[in-house]
Amino acid sequence: MSTSPKSLRETNDLRHLRQIIAGLDEGVILIDPDQSLLWANDAALAMHGVERLDQLGATVDDYRARFQLRYRNNHRLAADDYPIERVAAGDSFSEVVVEVTVAGEEDPRWVHQVRSLVLNDADEDVPTCVVLIVQDVTARYEAEDRFEQSFNANPAPAVICRLADLRFVKVNQGFLEMTGQDRDAVLGKTVYDIDVLHGADQRDLAKQRLAEGRTIPQMEAELALPDGGTKLVIVAGQPIDLDERPCMLFTFADLEPRRQAESALRHSEERFTRTFQLAPVPMAIGARDGHVLCEVNASFTALTGYAADAIVGRSLADLGLWADDTVRGDVEAAIADGGDLRSHEARIAVRDGDAIDCVVSTETITIGDASCLLWAFQDITQRKATELELVEAIEAVMKDTSWFSRSIMDKLARLRAPQPDADGPGLDALTAREREVLALICRGLDDKSIARALDVSGNTVRNHVARIYAKIGVNRRTAAAAWARARGFDDGAIALRSIARGTAQRGAA
């Protein structure tokens, strides 16, 4: 014998049921088997923005006409797919999420999560009432939408992976632009397919924290790029819940610009150092405060006789470089309060006690965070001597014009080809090794080249050069070469013999 659904409307149980569910936070709508709406609690009415049952609709068809439902992907529900239709048909379902729009409006007002319940008659086992249970999850989904929007709009690169399988479920535009990856190439891949912890300085700690779902502290890592290169980043991980599932949010800071800047700075410093050391102009670098030197070049050593290890860490005043306190005072006054010298004439005292006339210039530079001075010296001793000779010649002319031709011509000849001082030191004052070094100087070789030619150390060559300067009374290589040639020094033969002997010694070694 067939049985037809028995309406709960015909029983006294409806009143008791209403009393039980009236105060629930969840919305409850009771539907008669004939698809009429029996009753709804206050929560269900509020979730639809109405105050009375008739405003929901007298029947399932009325409800569908007054409220339009869409899935979260914006697809409209067919009539038979409405949760209220499905529950009226006795369908059992849970956690269906829909957006609810009031008829006549464009935008949805609420997001509902609904499930069904069928109440059967205990005796006849036929449905007496079907129940639609509604939860308003609008706030939760609005928060998720706001998170989604801010996540995608955030320029800071970020990805999110599920902790259950370590697969990426979200990636923002910042990460795609930083790495050059494709969105589809990232989503669904694991943390180790696209290794966001590659080269991390605390990789083991990061893997342990990831497995435990705990915060991963900031650390440097090398992100692998699709083109095979890497990018230096700072990566950190923060546990979050996404769609009620535990996830890990990885954020990144791109350190590649910093690495490139550091590399460019390092190369710039290397170029500066090479240029500084090879410059033919005597130069030194020192602190502006106290003028303590931190670097000198080879030309400075050749001019003053002070090697780097003897001068670095000492001030110019402590070194006694200035010829007297007056010169020192003038120089220090000129560069006080951040000023710089420009072609300032000053006399300096070199290591052997001689005085040299120089033009001194300075330039403020920054090394690290310190303000320093770059000192440049130009030896004008010969020029000043020449100027003095010209003055003397002019004075002689003014005194005796008949002597003009002989005197001036003699002075000009001396300017073009300085004559050796008959009373000065001769070649006999030099040792055999010093004559070899002098011969190579005359050939235009620098200290390093001389050291290689003679198979000796650079310090040994510098010591020989300093002794040669001291013996013949010069302070520059060009002056030493001129001194030697003025005395008919056969530099070519000696130089070739020295180079041959040095080459043989290296071959034997």
Image (tube, rainbow, N blue to C red):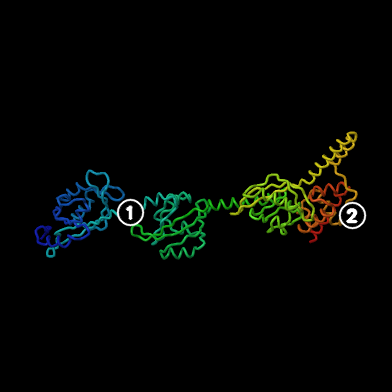
Q: Amino acid at mark 2?
A: Asp
**Residue farthest top in this picture:** 402
Q: Position of residue 316 (x, y in %)?
A: 70, 55
Identify the mark nearer the N-term, 1 or 2.
1
Return the residue nearer the eye: 478 or 388.
388
Measuring 59% from the left and 51% from the top, which residue is drawn there?
Answer: 265
Give the residue type at disc 1.
Ala
Residue 498 visible to the viewer = no
Q: Residue at x 52, y 59 (%)?
A: 199
> Crowdedness of circle 1 by 10 Å Cα count: few (<14), some, many (20+)?
few
Label drawn at residue 54:
none
Residue hosting label 1: 143
Whether residue 274 sits left or right of residue 429 in the image: it is left
10 Å crowding of disc 2: few (<14), some (14-19), many (20+): few
Q: State the residue at coordinates (87%, 38%).
A: 396
Q: Nearer the viewer, residue 458 or 243?
A: 458
Query: Is label 2 in a helix, a strand or a loop?
Result: helix
The residue under label 2 is 428
Q: Are marks 1 and 2 in contact (CB under 8 Å)?
A: no
**What percent of the width, then of the height, locates residue 289?**
63, 54
Q: Quadrant of residue 144?
A: bottom left
Whether residue 145 is visible, yes or no, is yes
Q: Quadrant of the N terminus?
A: bottom left
Tell me where residue 341 appears, x and y as whole percent. 67, 46
Residue 430 in which image quadrant: bottom right
Label 1 SS = helix
In the depicted view, which residue is nearer to us: 435 or 191? 435
